[in-house]
Amino acid sequence: MQERLFKIDTALLTPRTVVRRFREEDGPAVYQLIIDNRSWLNDFHAAWIDAIHNPPDAEIYVRRQLAAWLLQESYHFGIWDKDQAGLIGLVRLFRLNWQTPKAALEFFITPEYSQQGIMTEVLLTILSFAFDHLKMEKVSLMLAMDNYAGQRLARKCGFRREGDLRSEYRKPSGELLDMQLLAAYASDFKKLDV
């Protein structure tokens, strides 16, 4: 474990959101978010749906993510609307490799908050957290080849295409998808004008 991370920031502010670590009793908000976005999440975030079937499952999920944070295994954040204090999305850094050091990134925001620049704010803040606080050198992201909005967002935040992975992901429907691998690097991120 990294002793320097024992007192790391657990809440990050963007102009319109609070991106914070889960707390005990966040389960009901997470459950509602998953239920409200089930059809949208099903194709690419089925693990969240599989883990959360009811409010107690959601609270167990929240507490597992909190434990993973404390053990420095992953960093899972809720994205909370600053004005309405509602949970509007999730973002996590996972598959941490402290020797390289690198991490993978996964995120989603409810459709009603998309196309407003909010996710750009959130991802830039998360990348700053990853590079400045966690001291990661690389953060990778996989997106479906036809997820053009996600690819534009990633490029806006400093991600660059690393390669294409054929038949890399199977949707719950059984369809195999080609995925695009993107990565952001600490050295490049520091040069961004953000």
Image (cartoon, helix red, strand yellow):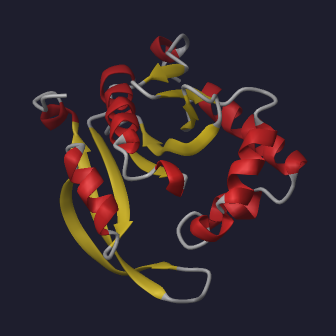
Q: Is residue 102 visible?
A: no
Q: Position of residue 191 (x, y in %)?
A: 10, 30
Of the pair 8 and 32, the residue shown nearer to us: 32
Q: Is residue 114 visible?
A: yes
Q: Is residue 192 left or right of residue 57?
A: left
Q: Is residue 154 left or right of residue 45?
A: left
Q: Is residue 2 left or right of residue 150?
A: right
* Image point (63%, 38%), residue name: 87
Q: Position of residue 182 (x, y in %)?
A: 26, 57
Of the pair 92 and 96, the residue shown nearer to us: 92
Above or below residue 146? Residue 158 is above
* Number of marks drawn: 0
Above or below residue 83? Residue 117 is below
Q: Is residue 149 left or right of residue 95?
A: left
Of the pair 50 and 69, the residue shown nearer to us: 50
Q: Position of residue 5 (x, y in %)?
A: 49, 17
Above or below residue 107? Residue 98 is above
Q: Position of residue 19 (x, y in %)?
A: 52, 29
Quadrant where the C terminus sits is: top left
* Image point (55%, 13%), residue name: 6
* Image point (51%, 43%), residue name: 91
